[in-house]
Amino acid sequence: MRTAARAVVRHNQRVVVVPEVARAFRVDRALSYVGVLLAGGVGLGALYAATGVGIPCPFLALTGWECPLCGGTRMGAALLHGDLGAAYGHNPLALLALAVLGVLSLLWIVEAVGGPALRPPARSRAAARRVGSLRWLVISLVLAVAYTLFRNLG
């Protein structure tokens, strides 16, 4: 495991730097998350394709606007029918995210079977770590709001 000295603690009248253990990336865990996400998406898409029943969006019901996830079930049903154009029309952001996740999954599968571990350059990883979790959350929320506005007003 990697360690990074970050936490400073006072102990017995002295300042002690305590190493903070960074969790190592586990390919098997990442692939299991992707598998669960894929199974759920295929299940919802198949249910919608067969019955027309989807998950109602409370944001859409309250505001009349589509949220960033609206159209995801219809997109999955269109993908199950092989209609990439319709899938893009239902939710282009979700389709792009699905494509990125697919590429990452292929890289992780290669790594899991003994191939090379492909990671971003160390400088990029360090810069991403410096941003911090809370800032990434705020950035994601700002992008979601911008996408919602663009989608409904554009």
Image: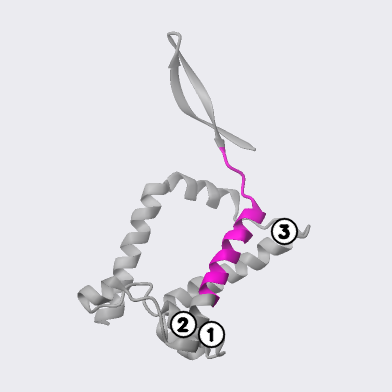
Q: Which residue is mark 1?
A: 79
Residue 128 versus residue 60 in the image, above or below? above
Residue at figure coordinates x 55%, y 90% from the top left: 81
Location of residue 28 by image quarter = bottom right
Q: Is residue 40 magenta?
A: yes
Q: Residues within 10 Å of mark 3 (few under 14, many from 20)?
A: some
Q: Mark 3–mark 2 contact, CB under 8 Å?
A: no
Residue 60 spot, x, y in % from top left:
27, 76
Q: Mark 3–mark 1 contact, CB under 8 Å?
A: no
Check disc 3 and report its element: helix, strand or loop: helix
Q: Residues within 10 Å of mark 1 (few under 14, many from 20)?
A: some
Residue 30 spot, x, y in % from top left:
60, 57
Q: Which residue is mark 3?
A: 111
- Image quarter where the C terminus lies is bottom left
Segment colored magenta: 22-42
Q: Which mark is residue 75?
A: 2
Check disc 2 and report its element: helix, strand or loop: helix
Q: Which mark is residue 55?
A: none
Residue lying at the far left in this picture: please name it. 63
Residue at figure coordinates x 40%, y 53% from the top left: 136
Q: Is residue 9 magenta?
A: no
Check disc 1 and report its element: helix, strand or loop: helix
Residue at figure coordinates x 31%, y 79% from the top left: 151
Between circles 3 and 1, the one closer to the viewer is: 1
